C-alpha cells in the first residue's frame, strides 16, 4: 500500500516533539521549490540547523497533518499570512496540502481577517498552480524580505491572496 493511501488521521497544533519532522519536511520542500529561484546567499544559510531552529520558533503558529503517527505536512500562519506550507514528498498529491490550506484559511478567519495572503517564489510553478486551483488569486510580483546572512534578502515572489468569509 502506498504511503499516501492511509487517511489523514489528525490536523492538530504542532508540539515541540514535532520539530525534527517539521524541519526535515521543510528543508526538503524548501529546496524543491526554491533552488534555482532564490539568491545564492539565501540558499547558503538554509542549512539543516536553520530549518530546525525556525521550526522550533514557529511551533505555536503551526498546524501539522499526520497519517498514523507520522507528521506528513504542516502549515504556519502568522496574522493574515499563510507563511509556510509544506508536505513530505511521498505524501504530495494526496490531499494533504489542500486540507492544511483550508485549515490555514480558518485560522486567518478566526484571527479576525477577511483576507489571507501568501508569497510564492516566482519560479515555483507547481506551487503557483496549486494555489490557483484552491481559489487564490495572483496579485503579481513583489520582493519578499527573507532573513539572510547579513540582514534581509529580497526574494522574487508572487503575492497570492484570497478573500475569506465571515468568521
Image: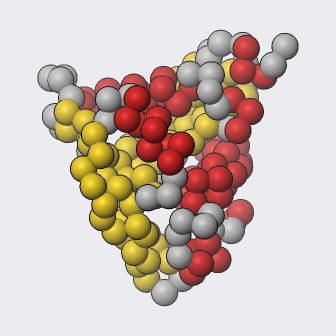
The residue under the point 65% across, 12% down is 7
The residue under the point 62% across, 27% down is 93
**68 lies left or right of 46:** right
- Measured as percent of width and height from the top left, residue 23 is found at 66, 51
- Measured as percent of width and height from the top left, residue 53 is found at 60, 62
Q: Nearer the viewer, residue 94 or 140?
A: 140
**69 lies left or right of 92:** right
Q: Is residue 74 visible?
A: yes
Q: Nearer the viewer, residue 87 or 56?
A: 87
Image-quadrant location for residue 5: top right
Query: What is the residue that sits farthest to the bottom in this orientation?
Result: 150
Q: Is residue 52 visible?
A: no
- Measured as percent of width and height from the top left, residue 146 is found at 43, 69
Classify 100 as above or below 125.
above
Classify 3 as above or below 31.
above
Classify 61 as above or below 159.
above
Classify 81 as above or below 109.
below
**In what quadrant of the picture does the C terminus appear?**
top left
Amino acid at each position: 500500500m502506498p504511503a499516501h493511501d492511509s487517511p489523514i488521521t489528525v490536523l492538530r497544533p504542532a508540539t515541540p516533539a514535532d520539530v525534527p519532522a517539521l524541519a526535515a519536511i521543510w528543508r526538503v520542500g524548501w529546496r524543491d521549490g526554491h533552488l534555482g529561484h532564490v539568491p545564492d546567499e539565501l540558499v547558503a544559510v538554509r542549512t539543516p540547523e536553520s530549518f530546525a531552529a525556525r521550526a522550533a520558533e514557529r511551533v505555536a503558529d503551526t498546524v501539522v497533518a499526520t497519517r498514523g503517527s507520522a507528521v506528513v505536512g504542516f502549515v504556519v500562519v502568522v496574522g493574515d499570512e499563510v507563511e509556510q506550507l509544506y508536505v513530505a514528498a511521498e505524501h504530495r498529491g494526496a490531499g494533504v496540502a489542500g486540507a492544511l490550506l483550508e485549515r490555514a484559511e480558518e485560522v486567518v478567519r478566526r484571527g479576525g481577517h477577511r483576507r489571507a495572503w501568501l508569497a510564492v517564489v516566482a519560479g515555483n510553478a507547481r506551487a503557483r498552480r496549486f494555489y490557483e486551483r484552491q481559489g487564490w488569486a495572483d496579485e503579481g510580483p513583489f520582493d519578499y524580505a527573507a532573513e539572510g546572512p547579513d540582514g534581509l534578502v529580497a526574494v522574487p515572489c508572487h503575492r497570492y491572496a484570497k478573500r475569506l468569509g465571515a468568521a
